[in-house]
Amino acid sequence: MAMRVTGALRRRLTVAACLVLVTTGCSAVADVFGDEAVLDTGIEPVALQFAGPTYMALGGQTLLLRNGSDQQVLPGGAQSAGWLPDGRALVDVVGRRSQVRVVDPATGPTGPTRSFWEYPSRAVTQVNALGIPPGQRLRSYDLSLAALDPVVLPPTDNPDATAYNELERNYYGAVPTIDGVTFVKWHDGSEWYLDGDYGVLRIEGDDQENVLINENIVGLYLSADGTGLLGLRQSSGDPCGGCVVEQDIVEIDPASGEIGAEYGVPDDYDRSWRVEAMDKVGDRVAVRFYEAVEKGARFTYDQRGTWVYDGEWTMVEDSDRELTWWQGEDRVVARVSDSERRRGDGFDLFWLHDGEETPLPGELASYPAGGAVEGAVAGQLLPPE
């Protein structure tokens, strides 16, 4: 059986190799492990069962779910809560961020109904959600929303915390699970504007460890196939939602919880750019950027392209004018004209298969970077290698 070389193990092997190669210098170790531009986690990709076209979109007052030739039409304001890798979808069946069920495009809703304070982040092997309201408990489910053992999240270990100053640990944001390890962002603060540390809790079985303490990680992004955990790092200042400062892209080593690779940003990057999506496919990292641009008395959200890192950054052709989700060798594309953007009509969808382009019924509710998407397209930011 092949040995998986994790980040922590790689570091130990590097030290050992340096000792062995002391007479020739440690630079020779690069030849032992190879000079990889993108971190190799050694994690096997989860099979994505998207028959294509696979998407959820609005059609009048209904929500259309489709995976290949299978489809369901849900009435009454249902909203997308995300896709699962097996071709089923998480759907808020009443549109109140409270009643989420699994919907199989072939057979309809199935399994239990679960209440969430916020929609779960991308789920590849399990569905995670913080408590209602977000607090000191992590609830987890399998891909059919059957409950797994809950995890009690530890309170702050800040010695300055008292009942008087109300300094406490808050958990927030996406809660990805990769290779059996779950990561949760946290920040120590209080209503008194006292500020403490911030970091990420790494959970593996019964073991919990604080990692990336004060490393300015403001976002965690799990790849669609579960092979990589990408991080968005703020280059200066403490993490906050409204600070317009430079950010860069890193990858977290699941084995250690530390930063395993730093990818930077494209040369064209501007600090006003923001990340709308990240993904990893094989030995390539992809990031979709957008920018809020003030035009007159309002803002529009302009695409700044999907950029690919494989040792250097390049922009995918036409990705500053259309959004693409790859489903195997084929893809769904979303486009909007300037007139549609002003009216707020959303994106029209197209299916590109065997060199032919076919319009798809339904549309995304609003510009994806604007935070009000009610449909969702499955897939990856890049085609398979």
Image (tube, rainbow, N blue to C red):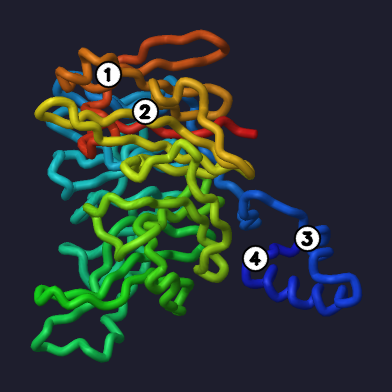
Q: Is residue 174 above or below residue 302?
A: below
Q: Residues within 10 Å of mark 2 (few under 14, many from 20)?
A: many
Q: Are marks 1 and 3 in contact (CB under 8 Å)?
A: no
Q: CA distance from mark 2 to mark 1?
A: 10 Å
For mark 2, give the secondary structure.
Answer: strand
Work out which quarter of the rendered image holds the C terminus and state it: top right
Left/right placement of residue 103 relative to residue 179 reads: left
Which x, y percent locates residue 79? 21, 36
Q: Are marks 1 and 4 in contact (CB under 8 Å)?
A: no
Q: Nearer the viewer, residue 338 or 45?
A: 338
What's under tag 3, amino acid-wise?
A: Ala
Residue at 34 percent of width and 73 percent of height: 151
For mark 4, give the secondary structure.
Answer: loop
Q: Are marks 2 and 1 in contact (CB under 8 Å)?
A: yes
Task: Tell me the residue that label 1 is attached to.
Answer: 362
Q: Residues within 10 Å of mark 3 (few under 14, many from 20)?
A: few
What's under tag 2, amino acid-wise?
A: Tyr
For mark 3, give the secondary structure.
Answer: helix
Q: Nearer the viewer, residue 11 or 6?
A: 11
Residue at 36 percent of width and 55 percent of height: 219
Q: CA distance from mark 4 to mark 2?
A: 35 Å
Task: Tell me the residue that label 3 is attached to.
Answer: 30
Q: Nearer the viewer, residue 111 or 364?
A: 364
Write down the quadrant of residue 324 in the picture: top left
Left/right placement of residue 223 relative to residue 293 reads: right
Q: Which callout, 2 or 1, points at the residue further toward the start of the chain?
A: 2
Q: Are marks 4 and 2 in contact (CB under 8 Å)?
A: no
Task: Tell me the residue that label 4 is attached to.
Answer: 6
Q: Is residue 282 visible?
A: no
Q: Which callout, 4 or 2, points at the residue further toward the start of the chain?
A: 4
